[in-house]
Amino acid sequence: MHHSFLDIYSDKISPIHKIDPRIKILISILLIIFAVTINNLFEFIVLSLILLISIFFSNIPIKNIFIRSLKIIPFILILSIFIPFVKGGSTLIQFKFIIPITIGKEGLILFSKIVLRSYLVVLITIILITTTRFTSLLKGFEGLKFPHIFILILSFMYRYIFLFFDEFERLLRARNSRMIKPGMFLKIKSLAYVIGTMFLRTFERSERVYEAMISRGFTGEIITMEQMSVKKLDIIILGFVILILLIMRLISIL
């Protein structure tokens, strides 16, 4: 179990790490709502500054956060790349490739907004996850009365995702040790076998784990020794963030 890509910086000591998980989740939700409703460059710049300040005070390498956030960009582009071509409006670029293709001004603006909003949401989520232990995050969700099934699914995912990766790596090593200069077709075929084997082993292991948990008295509730307490400073930070977001939105409207 040598994988640490989830909690690698969550045990650091910083002002951001010390904030109660429930308050951090509420702040993140407010920032995400604000990010998806951004309408102008002023709001984007101010929110970006807030996130940069948060990263600075979290003592987390800014390079690490931005590298992790950039990995999501290809998925955002795949989902939104066709917007400039299908959205109507005044024509900016037009060329012919089998059929006439037009890029409209309104479509390009909408595409830019979607990419920027999505990136900010990803950045907010990464900051939250990076500065909070996953167990504390789940405890925070529980304290905020999130659906119990949602918390259980995340909890089991966190507990067994490392085991899943270790199992997958062992299967790949076994496959590679039995193959000498394989062709592309053989590689794809063997990878399909590995994926099928992983599915069967995962299904069988989940049944064994569930039966073991039931035999030990598991009733669906995860009990931990961790206790959370909201400090005055946490309330002040939450109020300050709400005030800043309201001021920005009022300035934008006026």
Image (cartoon, rainbow, N blue to C red):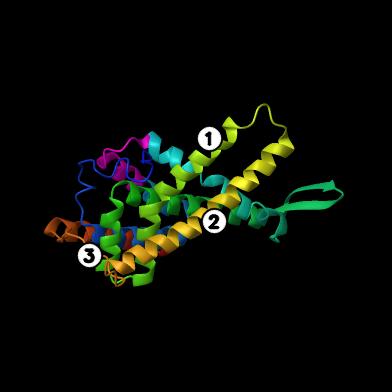
Q: Compute the Cα span from label 1 to label 3.
A: 37 Å
Mark 1 belongs to which amino acid?
Answer: Arg
Q: Which residues are magenta?
A: 49-62
Q: Determine which quarter of the picture holds residue 182.
A: top right
Counting other residues with Cα less than 10 Å from the Cα at mark 1, is it few (<14), some (14-19), or many (20 or more)? Answer: few
Locate residue 208: give its quadrant: bottom left
Q: Is 132 covered by the magenta stretch? A: no
Task: Point out the image quarter for the N terminus.
Answer: top left
Mark yes or no: residue 251 visible. Answer: no
Is 55 colored magenta in this rendering? Answer: yes
* Residue 178 x/y as whole percent: 61, 32
What's the distance in space between the residues labelled 3 and 2, CA to CA? Answer: 30 Å
Q: CA distance from mark 2 to mark 1?
A: 18 Å
* Earlier-in-chain disc, 1 versus 3: 1
* Residue indicated by mark 2: 200
Q: Which is closer to the viewer, label 3 or label 2?
A: 2
Front one among 11 and 87 = 11
The residue at which mark 3 appears reads as 223
Say which amino acid is labelled 3: Ile
**Residue 153 picture location, percent across and down:** 40, 63
The image position of residue 3, as x and y in percent, is 38, 40
Q: Give, as a three-letter code, the residue at label 2.
A: Leu
Q: Main secondary structure of the magenta part?
A: helix
Decide which of tag 3 and tag 2 comes sooner along the chain. 2
The residue sitting at 22% across, 64% down in the picture is 223
Name the residue located 49 percent from the left edge and 39 percent from the top edge: 170
Q: Position of residue 232 (x, y in %)?
A: 12, 59
In terms of secondary structure, where does tag 2 sit? helix
Task: Pick whichever, 148 or 18, lies toward us.
Answer: 148
Instruction: Work out whether residue 51 or residue 5 is closer to the camera in this orientation and state it.
Output: 5
Q: Is residue 201 visible?
A: yes
**Which residue lies under the disc numbered 1?**
173
